[in-house]
Amino acid sequence: MSVEIEQQSVQNDYLVVDVDADIVDGLNGFNPVGLGSRFRKSGNYTPISAVGVGDILSVTVFEADNGGLFSGESGNSANFPNIVVDRDGQISLPYSGAITVKGKTPVEIQNLVVSSLEGKAIQPQALVNVVRNESNVVTLNGDVTKPGLYPLPTKGARLLDIVALAGGTKFAARETFVTLQRGKRQGVQLMKTIIEQPNENIYVSRGDRIFVSHDPQRYTVLGAVQKPSVYTFDAATISALEAIAAAGGLQDARADATGVFVFRYEDPAILDSLNISYNKMRLGKVPTIYRINMKHAKSYFYAQSFHLRDKDSVFVSNARSVEISKVLRLLSQATGSVGNVVGTYNRFD
């Protein structure tokens, strides 16, 4: 089997890569494009929550002395508790007229109110608060306890903050993926990675759509193992050696220890980082077979450090003598010459 894979790799347009220390280190050290690099701006960026159409504001105006525009029984101030930002992005206050506030922060709106009252009120001051945030929201759906619309605080909010507001996810972090859509851009990341890597816990922005989905990662073990089957990741990471152990280990009488293979559609960026040549004309991911020769003691360390990914297939090939015995058994069934066939097999064994 090992020889056949090598011989057919050229014509079938797939790669065969022998696993060694450099390959293992390169695979484990590669950082794929995630949410952080796709969406996050440079530096310690905290988004400023600007006012939008439909938001409800509270505006309080203060004057420095009695006898001003806003003087009354309650003092030298006036409170306007429920001012709605209209479809033109404006609000209207007595003596101020229409003020365009869309896209402005509360502090910027305060300055606009004060400017509009200069020369009319006595040394005016203003305080603006967002009572209800109708525009600066994100949408969260999927496998969370409370899906819905969530307003963003003025200080900004990260992905995990929004998920926490929704009561958390319904399933384990290693089985949960987060998809974030922002305009025409989209990114997907494993929840466990977002928790463990701070740069993936990005700030969300107004209008973001977040979808949380339960998608357990799986791998397949086939060939000369005790229990070939499809397995679910029961830990954050599973090595090739652990996958074989989960399948009951190698069948001593059948397995070819030189032919342990991991089949994977590999990201071209990873192959580039490993300096592995491949057909650049091919679009999408590259069919790649990683070969581990378990006859060498050091390969056990490679297999222990070779982490599987979702949808990987581990295949343990049969020893050459097993393949020959299959052919001879077919011959014995066809000719009935059992004695001659057994003798022939003994000479190969």
Image (cartoon, rainbow, N blue to C red):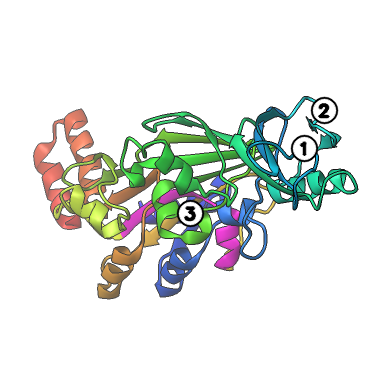
Q: Is residue 60 visible?
A: no
**Contact (Cβ within 8 Å) of mark 1 with mark 2:** yes
Task: Give left or right: position of 69 versus 28.
Answer: right
Compare marks 1 and 2 and give the one earlier in the sequence: 2
Q: Residues within 10 Å of mark 1 (few under 14, many from 20)?
A: many
Per the image, the residue denoted by label 3 is 7
Per the image, the residue denoted by label 2 is 88
Residue 161, percent across and down?
Answer: 46, 47
Dot 2 amino acid type: Asp
Q: Which mark is residue 102?
A: 1
Task: Give left or right: position of 175 versus 257.
Answer: right
Which residue corresponds to the image point at 67% horizontal and 63% vertical from the top-left?
42
Q: Which mark is residue 268?
A: none
In the foreground, 230 or 337: 230
Q: In the rendered image of this protein, does residue 77 appear above or below residue 336?
A: below
Marks 1 and 2, Cα distance to the nearest angstrom? 8 Å
Disc 2 is placed on an element classified as loop
Residue 198, percent across and down?
Answer: 48, 60
Span colored in magenta: 259-274
Marks 3 and 1, Cα distance to the nearest angstrom? 66 Å
